[in-house]
Amino acid sequence: MQACIMAEGTVEQAIETPAAVLEFPVSRAPGLIRASRTLAPLERLDVYRGMYELRLVEALKVDYPGLRKLWGEETFEELARLYVAAHPSRSYTLNRLGDQLPEFVPQVEGLAKARFAWDLARLELAETVVFDEEESAAAEAGAIAGLTEEQWGRLRFQPVRALRMLQMHYPAHEYMQAVRRDETPAAPRPRKTNLIVYRRAHALLHLPMAAPGYALFEMLAQGCTLAEGMEAMQEAGGGSPKQVFDYFRVWFEERLFSRVEIW
Amino acid sequence: MTNRWGLPDLGFGIGLRTVHFPHILADWPEMDWFEILSENFMDTGGRPAYVLDRVAERYPVVMHGVSMSVGSTDPVNFEYLKKLKALAKRTKARWISDHLCWTGVSGKNTHDLLPMPYTDESLRHVVERVKTIMDYLEQPVFLENPSSYLEFTSSTWTEGEFLSQVAEQSGCGILLDVNNVYVSAFNHGFDAGEYVDRIPADRIAQIHLAGHTNKGTHILDTHSDHVVDEVWELYRRVCQRAGGVATLIEWDEAVPSFETVRAEAWKAKAYREGNDACGSQAA
């Protein structure tokens, strides 16, 4: 029954798929189900098939509103059906059904704006992950007040859990923000974008960053010391002490760190 | 007054739904209790978890799940149960319920409440699984009769008989979804009144009411509308036998305002109390 429900095509085709035949021979399938006064056995099975597809496609629609807007309902639903067939749910929760969608997008031939769609899909996945992440208490800026220069270099910063970093070829976050305003934006032109997706006061937020700041934050997120992060920042284009100060001011204001310690 | 599991009649509740979060947090409206869809809160630490914590501080909360899959032949999912148990502890959930169904096999999940063949073999299978689950959760579980759209020719029990047997032999309770009885009765052509009359009254631990969608050839359990008159009459019939049982309104599609859903809950109260304003007087 499950194989029939999950198979593509018509119900008649579904009962002939190898997976369905493994469950029961095609000739026996209709005899396993009672007819009702209005529906034949396979029509009754088809009710479940319709609901399965609808439920999973709806779940993907909720998680990927940007892709829906980009392609329109028909194309998105077609992609969603292909995706669900390739990646059936293996979890009790639908929250993570779409986790492989960003990697699936480039595999589908003929999709319009595929390169931007890949960025957009990665952003939307990051948003769903950040939305569901555990809450973690934020560190206060006072944690780094009054330190010596030598202590500064040995500082380590742990980001809050509800945070993800993205490097994109397009400013997909600007597109998403327009979608959330109920607009119908055009797909943007390519522009290298470094982005932090995070949650503050239960709201999903985007923090675009210049390359040096992103390189510094990335190193810190990997557990490196501030001194190591500063080296990476220099390689990414450098930054003045004032810029570094401004980075940390914003990062603490946005409550991006959960822990600060001297290594 | 408590039931055989020592649990109280919580009165009349509604499902806790996202669209009502702002209203609930702003006004803390009068409501006897809330039911949550367990899976919506098990893996999130964001706003839903925050709201649930606030709600659980002020109202009794009951957990209703869709993934226990008591009819599946896959091993019992203890990872799922562990999270379920933790959520129940966190929310001080009065009880946990799920459905008499299976949701998937071979590690896959259809996210649907699939019907089972009602046979002696499947009865033994479900009873053992329910006992295992209740042992792990260290509390009784209440199983709901699902709405269904097909029946197996191999079934030797009716659904009502089967569910009653599961309850008697495992010790679990029954969450009687009166709308589901009506839906399945229409789809399969059995007598809904006879079904509810034969459910052991002392095993009915909770009641669900909801609206549905009539497609002509069959009815879908969509939770998308008001409870229909025929279901209200069935509910009255159940109340006459079972007395005070916690009753919940489910509304999941095209969810209207909080006040509209709550009005359905208060209507249930009037029905249970035999109030003339809600229709014909109980005999």
Image (tube, coloured by chain):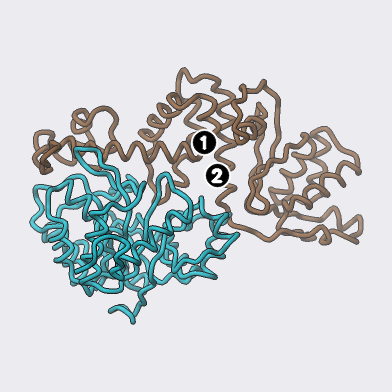
Q: What is the quadrant of the C terminus of chain A in the image?
A: bottom right
Name the amino acid, label 2. Thr
The chain to which mark 1 is attached is A
- Image point (21%, 41%), residue name: B218
- Image point (42%, 38%), residue name: A58
Q: Is the residue B171 above or below the residue A24 in the image? A: below
Q: Position of residue B235 (x, y in %)?
A: 25, 62
Chain A pictured colour:
brown
Label 1 Cα neighbours within 10 Å, binned few <14 / some 14-19 / many ≥20 = many
**Front-lying residue, B87 or B12:** B12
Location of residue B79 (image quadrant): bottom left
The secondary structure type at the circle numbered 1 is loop
**Front-lying residue, A157 or B207:** B207
The secondary structure type at the circle numbered 2 is helix
Residue at the disc numbered 2 = A128
Chain B pictured colour:
cyan
